[in-house]
Image (tube, rainbow, N blue to C red):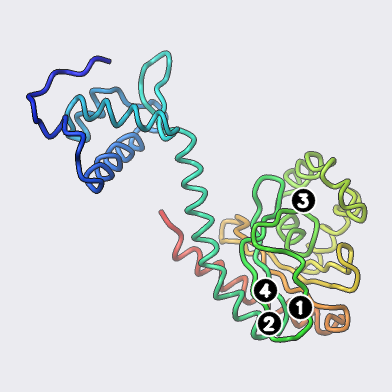
Amino acid sequence: MASAERPAGSQDEDSREPPVKVIDRAARMLRALAQHPHQGSSFTELMESTGLGKSTTHRLLAALVDTGLAFQDIGSRRYRLGSAVAMLAAGALAQWRVAACQPSLQRLAEATQDTVFAQVAEGTAAVCIGRATGSFPIRTLTLDVGDRRPLGVGAGSLALLSAMPDADVAKVLERNLRWLEDFPSHTPAVIRELVTQTRRDGFSFNTGRIVPGMLAVGVPVVDAKGLVLASLSVAAITDRMARPRALEIAGLLQAEARALAARMAEDQPA
């Protein structure tokens, strides 16, 4: 698209714009693109909705396309938001979940004196997004923040999977067949049995299937619509996780999960 000529020294053609102004204009363009996510917007529509000149609109769109934040449909030549926007949104959502979970992790770590984890489901994986350690000197640091496991492997991961519909559980197990080969104690048949047990008990219980001598209890964080937001789990050495204490910890986790779901519903970004 050819740019219309502008008067010399025009602000629209000034390449030395302050960074804040450039960001403001890019944000205006992204918001304009977001108004018509399905049918897209024409160049003229974007120029009119942002109030920007033709050459500025052209430069901004070219830059957004180059970075994957926008793209131009080949047939209609209309502009839409690109996949990079989804990545940014996912990152923002992840940070929101991390911040929301942290107070719960700290309270549980103080109450149990053991290690507490928060995980979320991403595709067929459970991803650790938070960890807090209690005061007990022997710590079970089986997951670092950012670690990924197949859904169903580990207490928090199993809690996530068990809260999903049966059809989703079946798809996850099918797609994770090769990944599960790295966890011989977690065959699809075993995980299906563990899902049934978790649903019956109301919490997951990992009896040293991953790390010998370590047990863990987990629960899902589910909103009012049944959406699985995260999981909370507590891990400890076997001597600290006899059945009576495991039940006590499960109760603490369930109460914290309910409070966290309510808090996340109130604070969820638009």
Mark 3: which secondary structure? strand
Above or below for 113 versus 46: below
Residue at 44% in and 64% down: 267
Distance from Cα at disc 2 to Cα at disc 1? 8 Å
The residue under the point 70% across, 57% down is 147
Residue 139's tag is 1
Q: Which mark is residue 74?
A: none
Sequence order check: which comes first, mark 3 or mark 1?
Answer: 1
Q: Badges 2 and 1: C-beta atoms under 8 Å apart?
A: yes
Nearer to us: label 3 or label 2: 2
Three-letter code for the amino acid on which mark 4 is drawn: Gln
Mark with earlier residue (4, 2): 2
Question: Image check: 158 left or right of 36?
Answer: right
Cα separation, mark 3 vs mark 2, equals 26 Å
Between tags 3 and 1, which lies in front? 1
Q: 214 or 157, which lies in front?
A: 214
Which element carries disc 2, helix, strand or loop? loop
